[in-house]
Image (spheres, rainbow, N blue to C red):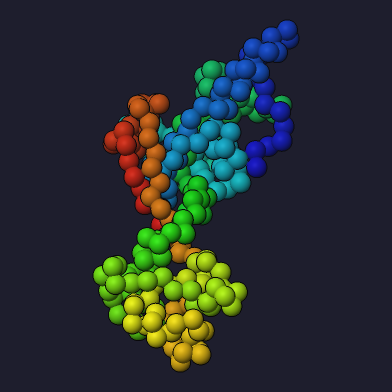
Amino acid sequence: MVPSRKFTRKSAKDGHNAAYHRDLHTLLNSQVLVLNRLWQAVNICTARRAFALVYAGHAQIVSSDEANNFMAHDFESWRDLSADAPDHEVVTTISFKIRIPRVIVLLVFDRLPKKEVKFTRHNVFERDKNTCQYCGQVFDRSELNLDHVVPRDQGGTTTWENVVCSCIACNTHKGNRLPREAHMSLIRKPKRPKWRPFVQITFSAPQHDFWKHFVDLAYWNVELSD
Ligand SMILES: [Zn+2]
């Protein structure tokens, strides 16, 4: 996590506590563009969150020189670089000052904001690829039912792990029985899907010129997947 030291503005003077705490708050809440491992823009977070990710080693801070060569920095390297940064862009701890990042790049996909895949009829069909999980055949959605593997009246739950796509014939044959009672077996064990829904991020204009290198459109969808 972010160093537990209290951040204070370097320019702060006694008697201006309220003002510089407000400034500090503003700086730490400024927006940072988040890139995935492929350097695609996937999110926006606060500088506070960006520092936490970088300090924990889950992300690096992106900088560029005049020739638009991009470099990624870990916490120490960024701290060293921050020594020359203008005061209005830095926060100062007891022992060092550090520049507010504009862009970070994630080192792991797992640190992306997680959105659970909603448990819906549509998503069960998506997970099972419109395939009956008993006979293995692909059907039109109108010809598929959702089947409780363990029937509800035997304690079966309506969850990712107990609901599958089933064709009408298999569903009718199985009836209100366990698969083994009907001498049927599943082609695969039902699980919560690993894929994630599209994450939509909307903003009216890039907050910083630097973002333009990574953001082509004002609206974008990025599929978050491993
Ligand atoms: Zn079937």
Q: Residue at x 39, y 86 (%)?
A: 173
Q: Residue at x 40, y 26 (%)?
A: 207
Up-down: is 223 above or below 21?
below
Residue 71 placement: quadrant: top left
Decide if residue 105 is on the left or right side of residue 1.
left
- On the question of residue 173 being in view, the answer is yes
Q: Position of residue 220 (x, y in %)?
A: 32, 41
Q: Quadrant of the N terminus?
A: top right
Q: Quadrant of the C terminus?
A: bottom left
Residue 145 placement: quadrant: bottom left
Residue 200 placement: quadrant: top left
Q: Position of residue 185 (x, y in %)?
A: 45, 86
Up-down: is 66 above or below 3?
above
- On the question of residue 81 being in view, the answer is no
Q: Residue at x 46, y 63 (%)?
A: 194
Front-lying residue, 142 or 116: 142
Q: How many marks?
A: 0
Front-lying residue, 212 or 22: 22
Q: Residue furthest bottom?
A: 183
Q: Residue furthest top?
A: 15
Decide if residue 138 is on the left or right side of residue 166.
left
Q: Position of residue 119 (x, y in %)?
A: 47, 59
Up-down: is 54 above or below 123?
above
Q: Residue at x 34, y 78 (%)?
A: 168
Q: Position of residue 198 (x, y in %)?
A: 38, 50
Q: Residue furthest left?
A: 140
